[in-house]
Amino acid sequence: MNDMGNPNYRTFDPSKEDGAEPPQPRSNSLRDRIRRSAEQTGAKPSVSPSGYVHQQPEAAAPAAEPRPAEPAKSASEAPAQNAPSAPAKQPVAEAPAQRPAAQAQPAPKLGEAPPRPSELAAKPVEEKKPEPKADPDSVSENALQPIGVVLEIAGSGSMIAIDLQRLNECAEDEDPSIAMAGQVGSQIKIRVGNSWLLASVRNQKQDRKAGSILANIDFLGEGIEEKLTGKLHGFRRGVTRYPTPGAMVYPASTPDLKQVYASDGRSAVTIGRVYPTKDIRAGLYVDAMLGKHFALLGSTGTGKSTSAALILHRICEAAPEGHIVMIDPHGEYSAAFRNTGVILDVSNLQMPYWIMNFEEHCEVLLTSNGNDRQVDADILAKALLHARSKSRLAESMGKITVDSPIPYLLSDLSNAIQDAMGKLDKSTTSAPYMRIKNKLEEIKGDPRYQFMFSGMLVADTMADFIGKVFRMPSNGKPISIIDVSGVPSDITATVVAVLSRLVFDFAIWGREERTSPILLVCEEAHRYVPSEKNADGNSVGTILSRIAKEGRKYGISLGLITQRPSDLAEGVLSQCGTILSMRLNNDRDQEFVRAAMPEGARGFLDAIPALRNREVIVCGEGVAIPIRVSFDNLEESKRPASEDPSFVELWNKTGGEEDIVQRTVQRWRSQG
């Protein structure tokens, strides 16, 4: 039997005890969670430059008519309409803990002017100074109010919840950085102690239960909060201290991003504007970008060639006595650097054949495969060493090898092969000797090969050739464009291999001299450093892979430009410390780039298929944090000849076709 039937029996109800306050209604909305989190952590209101106190946002409540007096309620339940009735004895800019709770004002709605200080207190506040003029770097009210809270924390990223109403309020802000707050690819900040932690929004999804938006973020770095203004400064990569779940999330404003993207004193060149801001310049740290190689990726038609020309022009302007060698397979960049560089093609390159090493000789002179190729290589090695040793330079040097860049006569090489074929003690038939000799005679007689296999190139011009190609001295023209579009296709890879190897060997043998770094830029890099499935065994892939792995130790920088990153050798792109990715339409290319980019750029990678022309995602050593950049417009005289033709415009013009055909056929027949 229980006591429930006893008239004196009553259950314990805390709300009915003496001095008890009525229970406060609790809401599960994210806006209320943000407000309660601020109250529990004792967050102080932010003060704008005008002196207005920005309170934490209150829960949205429908407007109601004034009601008659009710029993005493808690301070937090006091209606905001009655706030001015309580006299204020503290200045406006003081913390809410020192003000009566009844004075709390709801945050002004978007588009409304903030209440004047005189409206916040019954007692008028003495006017100290007139309001200063608008500061271009002043922070809007949306930047001072949180937009969400942290839900989960992980080593590289976290999950946050964003209030949809706050997101809509920020979307109408005049500051484009705040207007983008919470969207994919935007930056947000989280207060951790006396620092701000900057993060990038990777993705979004709707949380139907809570009526909010869930987003994954990637941490980018941290900066110190300036005590007086609350602005961020001294930004650096990495995270020293992580936030805790429940920490509030704020939008990153344009003044914040100016501090983040501001140069830290290192040499930098500007290439465009940071998206989505209007006036923040995007810079590349030249030493960091070139010191650990870089890659420029983008599908055809995205403005890749013009962007590459822009970057190289900026580097040449910053370092007019530099040393840049660019391999141009299509002859596009001759027009862009006609006034600021030296253009070398088959008409004036004059690359001596004897500068090739033994492997490159084999690529040019041997036509056999399998076991026959090894036999031919042995014959060529003996004949080549014999021809080099007959040079006067070789006699003065003593011991030489088959790879030594010693001048020799093509006739001496041909005679050495002929003599070896006539010996009775040769271990094979005459067929291998005839194959090598016939190929040599064919090259000597073909006018297309005269830029390299000419009898006039037998003189010792190695020092002059290196000085001309490497721009030593540069004489104000630090870049040399090697136009290989006129080189026969069967030896194009060999020519590129020779030039690349000369860069590497020169750096190795010049270590005892004053360091002269060289930048080697390779357009259509997937043709020369192909993946394993496309590899053809050419020496150019071997030497470029070696430069990618070891070049920075010797002061060599490698710049790769390609439209098919998935066709590149796997290890080469991963060696590039800075990656500039324009729009990529192929899924395989996107996955390949995603695997090569650091984790902090994952939020930007999802935007690669949606990039506009002449927009790029930059991440790595060359920038402070991953950024999206809109490239500057390049002057007409500095653009490469890579613009797409207008079919409609050209097909509406006629006249002179017969002469065009005749001139084209004449050039075709007289090639070389």
Image (spheres, rainbow, N blue to C red):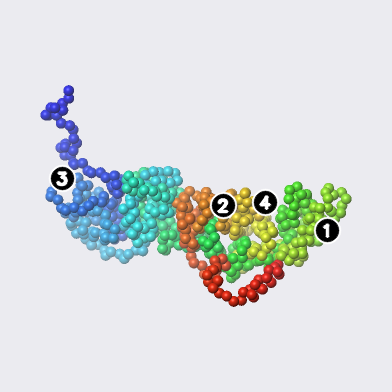
- The nearer-to-camera label among 1 and 4 is 4
Count every numbered label the image shows and give the total: 4
Distance in Å between CA atoms under marks 2 and 1: 46 Å
Residue at numbered disc 1: 415
Distance in Å between CA atoms under marks 2 and 4: 18 Å
Viewer can see residue 527 = yes
Corner quadrant of residue 313 = bottom right
Residue in the foreground of this view, choosing between 126 and 206? 206
Residue at numbered disc 3: 72
**Earlier sequence position, callout 1 versus callout 3:** 3
**Earlier sequence position, callout 2 versus callout 3:** 3
| Residue occupying the point 43% across, 49% down | 218
Is disc 2 placed on a helix, strand or loop?
helix
- The nearer-to-camera label among 3 and 4 is 4
Residue at numbered disc 2: 566
Quarter of the image for the N terminus: give it: top left
Q: Are circles 3 and 4 on residues that touch, CB within 8 Å?
A: no
Place of residue 261 in the rendered image (x, y in percent of width and height, measured from the top left): 44, 58
Place of residue 427 in the rendered image (x, y in percent of width and height, measured from the top left): 83, 48
**Earlier sequence position, callout 2 versus callout 4:** 4
